[in-house]
Image (cartoon, rainbow, N blue to C red):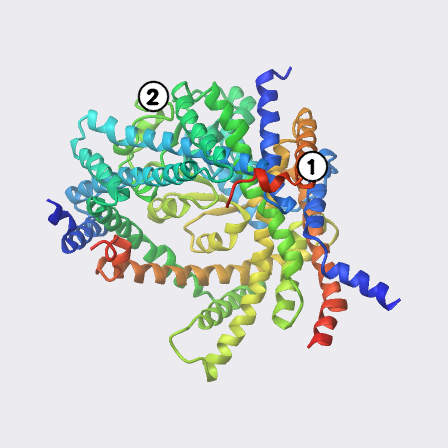
Amino acid sequence: MTDIIEISVVAVGTFLAMSMFSTLYGKSNPLYVLAEESYIGFATGLTIIWNIDYIWKTGIVNIMGGDWVLIFSLILGAMMLFRVHPKYSYVARLPIAVVLGAQFGLSLRTIIFSGFTQQIQATIRPLFSGPTRTLLYNWTIVICVIFMLTFFFYTVEMEGLLGTSAKFGEYLLYIAFGAVFAQTFMGRLGLFVGFMQSYTIPDWETPYLIGSMLLVLGLVVYMDRAGLLEKLTPEE
Amino acid sequence: MAEILKNRQLQLVVMALSFLMVFLPYFLNIPALNTASTKLITITAIVTAFTVALAVIAQFRRGMNIINRRSRGWYFKVYMLVTLVLMLLFSLMGRESGPYHWVMYSVVNPLSSVNYGILAFYMASTCARAFRARNTKAMLLLLSGFIVLLYQAPLTGAFFPGIEPVALYLGDTFGFAAGRMFLISVTVGAIVFGVRVIMGNEPSVLGLGGEE
Amino acid sequence: MADESGGIMKLMAEYDRRYVYLILFLVVTIPLLSPIGMPISVSPDTRQYYGILQQVQPGDKVFFTLNTEFSGYNEIQSGIIATMRVLVEKNARICFGVAHVEATSIPELILKAVHDELEAKDYQYGRDYVILGYVMPNEAAVAAMAQDFQGSVTQDWLGRPIAGTFLDEIDDWQDWDLIADFTTGIQTTSLLNHFALRGTPMIVNCIGVMIPSQKPYVDTGVYLAILQSMRGGAELELLIGHPGPGLTAMDAFTFGHYMLILFIIIGNVGYLGYTRNAQRRAG
């Protein structure tokens, strides 16, 4: 037996979701803005809660447990907040320097390997021994990586052999983009299908989905015909 | 004190020291240094969490600006600020059930889903309208796109099993190579940019330049 | 006659995009309401992913990371739930961590979906699974967890101490037996760089957009396997013999793809039959 809370969750959820979809109608409307501002407000509140929670658990709880060094994190964090003050924004420079330095240290010490040396190493593949399918794959990958990279050389003149290489690389890129576009569409479609699944399974939720869709569409069309869209929609 | 905090050289030195404190211990196995480095990383994690407040303050300011000017639809901004405060209050009442739980499942989750789900529509209409076989390159793109799209639809593989090796070949070689190529390029760019910032050649990143 | 064919060609070249929206909505909704149950083949990547899961031993400590907003969960929930089923079947010990505030509600949904399996195996909170919540807000947080887990994480998502749970056995990156990452890209690169690059075994279930950027890491061996989007999740459900949201969605998935192909063909026919001729006449 579905209780009233569950029903209210589905009813409100489908109405707000369909309100957000109403932007597909082609004109701004107040229902879309209602949904948008609901999301912004609640999601921002959510972000604040969980970040305070993180600061509490990782910082304050550990300080109370004896890890006094972490007091610096609270001091630097408070200094960071001065960034928005027009007169005292320079106070935030020190924490920015600490954070930026550490972040660059974290990323540079690893991406050199994961994003560069290992990738080049992995591109060097056996080209003359192995099963036919593997050889075909290896040759294609090596050729593609080399010629695609030459397409992006902007510091030298693209002429002669380099120019031909870049041109060939461009054609290979278009084939690659076709495959990438298909995978991207699969991802986007999956997002939408997954959303629709959440309101068609179980079956009792479907009438709320269809009802909300019709209600929102009806309201938007009515407001459009009555000339209310312009009046009720906020300025951009 | 203000002069010390405004000092650009001090900022660059602090940044360089912070960088070295995190970078070097990764390669040198000195326990004391590792401990200090880990503490600095934890401090960085907490300080970065504070920066969310900057975004929230900006959001508040923008909202209050619209409300004060009484721009058309200003009441939506009032509504937004009210929902923000409500969410904070609801979280104090418990996160496993109650109003917080209700808001998560009836507002945040569905709207987050739509936020990205709507991209399927935009992508479908854009692709349908923009992908034209105008020249050889466009034809190549369309052809490889079609083959991979057909393979991704499960029904195709059931009736035309021959499409699978072709589609996998396109995705696992051309698509893969493009991904690797972009990864290498982006990594080199990131390394160069990082070095420039550490050397002090990118003042805008540090918030310098306009304020001095 | 010439006007008529020009009319049809013109319509095919310049139709209102709202028709695309409406038809996409219908081709997705109708199969979800009346599923057909189409056959599906399993790709080598999914077999590899499944193979890694099969190697999980009882008691293995698995870091189940949700690097996704709630919207991404809709796409990869089939992979998430199927993976969770296998891990519970293997009696793995599971620690949930999330990298986005919206994902804080996802562990609850996962546990609800595998409730029967958890009961059958007598999974206890603290002994067999823990929910840490939002512990990966940024790269530094991930790096801190990798180097000093006990120093950076002391409480679960509801503020209860994790002392006394199986997480007492975790000091740093070496102590995890597997990271199962479900991602739209938030802190996955951080996990890769600070855990997997050091040797922590890691598998990834990513959304479709990320596939080209993540596959190079499988090739270098940093990731052990990758599960691709909703289709990969459906294939995994087939492999484990437990149909779920992924397989149910494949009908809608199929028709959505065919719809796009059809509209592109229609547009190109219209382009060749009308737009190109109109451009030539004008030019």
Q: Is residue A173 left or right of residue C178?
A: right
Left or right placement of residue A130 versus residue B207 in this view:
right
Q: Is residue C236 visible?
A: no
Q: What's the residue type where badge 1 is placed? A: Tyr
* Residue B194 placement (x, y as % from top left): 29, 58
Q: Is residue A112 or residue B40 the one in the foreground?
A: B40
Relative to C198, say whether C3 is above or below: below
- Can you identify the residue that label 1 sits on? A222
Q: Amino acid at mark 2?
A: Arg
Between A124 and B24, the residue placed more toward the observer is: B24
Q: Position of residue A168 (x, y in %)?
A: 53, 75
Residue C110 drawn at (x, y percent): 52, 29
Give the left or right position of residue C75, taking residue A48 as reference: right
Whole-angstrom CA distance, mark 2 to mark 1, is 52 Å
Image point (66%, 44%), residue name: C253
x 54%, y 23%: residue: C115
